[in-house]
Amino acid sequence: MGVFAPSTVRTAQVPIWRLLDCVLATKYDRHQVHSNFTAAVLALPLALVIGLGGCAKSKHVAPRLPPTPGGAETGIASWYGDPYHGRAAANGEIYDMEKMTAAHRTLPFGSWVRVTNLTNNKTVDVRITDRGPFIDGRIIDLSRAAARAIDLIGPGIAQVRLEIIPAPIGTSTPALYAIQVGAFQDRDRAERLRDSMVEQFMPARIVLQAGVPNVWRVLVGGTGNLDDANLLAARVRAKIGECLVVRLDDAPADAVR
């Protein structure tokens, strides 16, 4: 696979391999980084001293306004595949790098975007399901399939233009289900329960339900299949007691944490 430049952290809990991605610099292939994982771990103390400052910079990016319907946004696109394939995206769906999806920092989940590679004028339409990229100058992180469609695999990054478009005819946002195990006005309590659930039922996250007062919901799992959600709910009840199967597709775009 050609070289591509990874984005930084997508979740509040940062696994060690994600930190290594950032420390070893964005110009390297993630596959190469992870195949040399053992050597990288041995070198971690030195790498942290040298690279942590640079990693921190990539997580604090200048805010950008999303394109409005009919408007456009230009900047750098990148793509991501392993090790995120098969893991939960920020909207709760399981990320499939062979589907036409993408990560954007601010656009609502379910938005459709036309991405034009300005070096060859090739276009691809993608649905926003994730958050990122968190590197200054980059505006979208494409799935591998979407990157392949506009010849982005080899170079890894390219200047692109984004345009918000209507959902393609015949498509609809899939239903998403999760298990609600608690709801709290105190965010600290919600985070403690989430941390406990991560150890037993990854993934787990908290979602803000804005109101007076605000309520922090603790959610476990994420699936588009209601039967699978009910099976997971049965497992959760056996461990902790009462819980609820809830739909996620109407959650606010910036609520999943």
Image (spheres, rainbow, N blue to C red):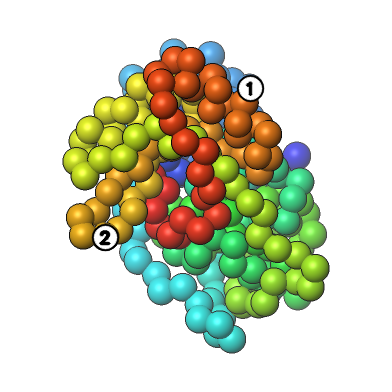
Residue 18 visible, this orientation: no
Relative image position of residue 88 (x, y in whole percent): 56, 38
Q: Nearer the viewer, mark 1 or mark 2?
A: 2
209 w.r.t. 198: above or below: below
Residue furthest to the front? 242
**Looking at this view, is 178 or 72 the one in front?**
178
Residue 228 disc label: none
Hey, what amino acid is under mark 2? Gly
Q: Residue at x 48, y 15 (%)?
A: 238
151 w.r.t. 91: above or below: below
253 w.r.t. 257: above or below: below
What is the quadrant of residue 234 in the picture? Answer: top right
User: Helix or strand or loop: what does disc 2 sit on?
Assistant: loop
Does residue 66 appear to the left or right of 129 in the view shown? left
Relative image position of residue 73 (x, y in whole percent): 53, 76
Relative image position of residue 140 (x, y in whole percent): 56, 61
Residue furthest to the bottom? 70
Q: Residues within 10 Å of mark 1 (few under 14, many from 20)?
A: few
Q: Residue at x 24, y 53 (%)?
A: 214
**Looking at this view, is 220 or 119 the one in front?**
220
What is the quadrant of residue 200 in the picture? Answer: top left
Hey, what amino acid is under mark 1? Ser
Query: What is the total number of numbered labels drawn onto the structure image?
Result: 2
Does residue 63 appear to the left or right of 169 in the view shown? left
Residue 211 disc label: 2
List the residue tagged with mark 1: 35
